[in-house]
Amino acid sequence: MARFTNQAQLAYRNRITTSNIAVGEILEVLSAAKHAVVETYESYDVITYVVSLVNSGATALTGLVLTDNLGAYTFNETSLFPLQYVANSLKYYVNGVLQTSPVIASQEPLRIEGISIPAQGNAVVIYQAALTQFAPPATDSTITNQAVISGTGISSITVEETISALAEPILNITKSISPVPVTENGALTYTFVIENRGNVPAAPVDLIVITDQFNPILSDLTVTFNGTAWAEGTQYTYDQTTGLFTTKAGEITVPAATFTQNADTGAWSVIPGTSTLVITGTV
């Protein structure tokens, strides 16, 4: 409910007097809410947003405009958009029935034109936005994007939603072999590089386990992790009959990635944290 005030002025014979202040209220018929389907994000995620609109009035609302700033912030006097509208992702429902999508008039910021809501009815606007290189990745980072719904005969409504950077490791592993080729009864080395692109380290509590079944089966294993020798039975197990190698849960740790924002463009870059497991044996 919007309150407004008004005061009149009376002038006569070079005198001026003012009236009391009259106070009124406008009963707003349009209400809105905005939600993200998920509340956390990782780099280059796609986030689905839902904007719900309710018309409690006795007259249909037509020609409404929804403008979303996609989390824009100022960097070096330039507006950067950490979110980008995903083409063809717009869905528009009126009273639960899918409608022809309204017009996307602009993508940065996102501007959707031609939304209508029947009297005593509702509309739902759903769209997706992908994270860009300007989305902050650190553990305490957030993205807040605002949507403004406006139109003739209504008071503009602003709704917003905040999502937070996911605080957890994001791991992948690569494996290499040397030498190639290897001679019979020769030494063969497998190197595993574990990368962490996440904003927190992978710790023992994450219970990381690497398993590999060597074929051909290796004998006389030596194992190192980040240059430190590992002992069989303590940090890993190995079955020389089947060739199954398994690390003990919690022995592998990986440091967090480091993030840098380009001082000129504002783009974020990531340097993954890495750990290396090296296994050498005789073929």
Image (cartoon, rainbow, N blue to C red):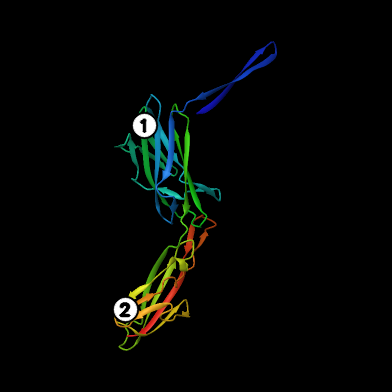
Dot 1 amino acid type: Ser
- Choose between 129 and 110: the one closer to the eye: 129
Above/below status of 143 relative to 112: below
Nearer-the-camera pick, 92 or 239: 239
According to the picture, the residue beneath numbered tag 2 turns out to be 214
Image coordinates of residue 80 in percent, x first then y, are: 49, 49
Which class describes the residues within 10 Å of circle 1: few (<14), some (14-19), or many (20+)? Answer: many
Q: Are marks 2 and 1 in contact (CB under 8 Å)?
A: no
Residue 116's disc is 1
Nearer mark to the viewer, of 2 and 1: 2
Reply above or below: 242 against 198: below
Label 2 amino acid?
Answer: Phe
Q: Residue at x 44, y 74 (%)?
A: 276
What residue lies at 55% left-to-right and 48% top-to-bottom? 77
Residue at image location 48% in from the left, 52% down from the top: 164
Label 2: few (<14), some or many (≥20) within 10 Å?
Answer: some
**SS label for mark 2:** loop
